[in-house]
Amino acid sequence: MSTPVDDALDPLLRERSHLASSRAALRAMREDVESLDIRDVTANWVNAAALAHQIDERVKALADLGGTPLFFGRLDYLPAPGDQGAQGTPGTEGAQEADGERFYIGRRHVHDSMGDPMVIDWRAPVSQPFYRASRKDPMDVGLRRRFGYTGGDLTAYEDERLSDPAEAERTSKLLQREIERPRVGPMRDIVATIQPEQDEIVRSALGGTVCVQGGPGTGKTAVGLHRVAYLLYAHRERLARTGTLVIGPNRSFLHYIEQVLPALGELAVRQATVDDLVAHVEVRGTDGAAAAVVKGDARMAEVLRRAVRAQVTMPAEAVVVVRGSRRWRVPAYEVEEIVRELLARGLRHGAAREALPQRIAHAVLVQMERSGEAPDDRVQDAVARDRAVKAAVKAVWPPVDPAKLVLRLLGDAEFLAAHAEGILDADEQRTILWERPARSVRSAVWSAADAVLVDEAADLVSRTPSLGHVVLDEAQDLSPMQYRAVGRRCTTGSATILGDLAQGTTPWATRSWAEALAHLGKPEGVIEELTAGFRVPTDVIAYASRLLAHIAPGLTPVASIRENPGLFEVRAVSGMEDVVAACEESLRREGSVGLIAADGRVAELGALLAAAGVPYVSPGEETTAESRLTLVPASLAKGLEYDYVVLDEPGAVVDGEPDERTGLRRLYVALTRAVSGLTVTHGGPLPVQLG
Ligand SMILES: Nc1ncnc2c1ncn2[C@@H]1O[C@H](COP(=O)(O)OP(=O)(O)OP(=O)(O)O)[C@@H](O)[C@H]1O
């Protein structure tokens, strides 16, 4: 480690002093906001409350989180060679203004009382070289310094002089230490150690949709969350208007990731599951795999489109409007022309229904003008509201209740056949029909896939508002109809799609990302691949990767960049008591412990843990110092991680799924949750694919 020439004798002391003054400056910024007197500027209490809320949010965003460093890096730019007018390197706009300057890179911007920056937000253009500069392309950086911290205290630093030919390439110890740090509690941000290939995705432009394929632990979730934070920084106003959304597979996963964005100062990002998005009806039932596959098939969109369109019928009679002593008659063929024209325009059912009365009224007005009257807009409005016009609209273009429409499709074989003709074969139609047709929307036993159909129908009736940006995690498990549901929530925005084809465990799991992007309505989306693994130790990932050839041939195995080979043991046991013992062994080490088991074995294992006096929680529940063990049903393990994992009975995990490939994929997920060590316990034979 070399000492910078311009630093005082003890550079660490000097950096600590900069940290202390930055903290003081942040405190001053916070106090400035807190002391704002809003009495003069707010005319009424509603405004006052809104402003007070904004101030409150701002104060929260300016919090100095004691446990995390205010800055984690420093960049010293090279002085500009020669004159002032030197050209900067393309793509480093920030760097052009930064010649010879020094910047501290941190989670948020901090300035002193004069407004001069003390810490630069990691998302600012000037910070980008911290993540991207290399020996090959130093991006005008003379010195890159990384800081090591213990809690909030600065305890080490590490320098790279990227333009110095004498300095050899080496991996950063601080980076390695950060990656190896035990995991406790919910997911944390990776802002200090984002890797160049990750940074490219994080900073990709708002206009584009990016789809990231990456094996377990390659940082997909982390990258998706940091991309939202980046986009909010770069396009704050626009996204504040349109909104952002992070979609995850279930509550416990969302709970696991919920701290990351607030820690980066972003408090306004909504999180939801796909089920939350389409909650038009109460879901109380489940589908068999066959029914769910057909209901999730994109062809259902066409069935629904036809069913909605079929609600529009051609008029059988003329519309007769009586005004005063005169009768105006719009003949049936003319109303039909209007209806056909509205159909051809492809408007939403509801929008066209609203336009129809005005169009009929317009036809009446034309007749009035022809007969010498001079009606104005008010007359047209009055005619549009006329009883006869309303009755005609109701007959020709009735309102559609999306849930009732789906209820009829799934409950009425003839109705379904009429609209699925040529789209679904007879078998498929039988598969999705309810055994007992429901009487009402309330009493129907809706499934999750049904709710997605209702959402599609709702969008045919009135357009779903689009958000500015949507992040979709664990995307491989979505059905085409679910992709459509997500896609219509970002029609005018963009998306980040994250997933791993090898971890797809639904019967309708994604086969290719190009297909998924097409269903999402973003066929132009760019597909990126991440292959460096940050979670799973070398020996463990090598073991899990034996399954790849059977579950997703063609995918690149993850290359673990962990130095720690990790603890790895496959242990034959004689009963569940031995599994409990394995958990107790893991609990003697530092960090979190996950016991992952086939869903069907969880209750029994839970009872045994309780009997042995080993406290545990379920996924999504907060672990404490006393209960660091989480008992995880294999079906909920996706996306989560634990320092030590005990994986109970791999054979049962495989057998718990309807087919072998899904079973092996479930096992692959379970095998790849460990950060520091994995103990596989088995009483029965191991799946042969594990060799
Ligand atoms: N650049 C990085 N620096 C430090 N840690 C990282 C980095 N990238 C990822 N990690 C860590 O690696 C772990 C795995 O990351 P993440 O959960 O985002 O991976 P994933 O690809 O979504 O995994 P899975 O497919 O299992 O859901 C996390 O603990 C994350 O913080």
Image (spheres, rainbow, N blue to C red):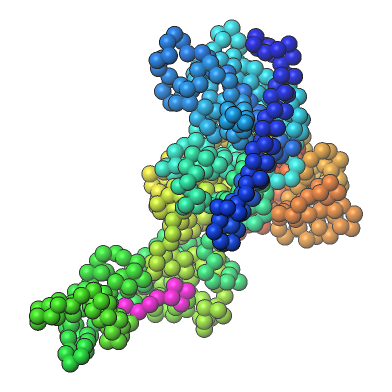
> From the viewer's perspective, is 206 left or right of 276?
left
Q: What stretch is highlighted in magenta?
A: 395-405
Residue drawn at the location 69% of the way across and 24% of the way down = 18
Is residue 681 highlighted in magenta? no
Outermost residue toward the front? 40
Work out whether residue 100 or residue 589 is closer to the camera in this orientation and state it.
Answer: 100
Q: Quadrant of the N terminus?
A: top right
Q: Viewer-proximal residue, 54 or 441? A: 54
Q: Residue 305 location in percent, x, y?
A: 36, 67
> Does 398 appear in magenta?
yes
Residue 198 lies in quadrant:
top right
Residue at the far top in the pictured view:
166
Image coordinates of residue 517 in percent, x first then y, are 43, 48
Quadrant showing the C terminus: top right
In this rendering, position of residue 46 left or right of residue 573:
left
Residue 660 visible in rendering = no
- Vertical position of residue 633 compared to residue 227: above or below: below
**Outermost residue toward the bottom in this view:** 325
Residue at position x 20%, y 90% in the image: 324
Establish if 542 lies above or below 11. below
Query: Looking at the image, which residue is at 58% across and 70% down?
Result: 283
Instruction: Report which quarter residue 413 is drawn in.
Output: bottom left
Q: Nearer the viewer, residue 125 or 228?
A: 125
**Camera sees residue 459:** yes
Number of labels in the image equals 0
Q: Considering only vertical position in the picture, is 274 above or below 283? A: above
In the rendered view, does 445 fall on the left or right side of 611? left
Rendering coords of residue 149 (x, y %)? 73, 28
Q: Is residue 87 above or below residue 594?
A: above
Q: Could you tell me which residue is drawn at 17 percent across and 85 percent down?
A: 329
User: Picture coordinates of residue 79 (x, y %)?
Assistant: 51, 13
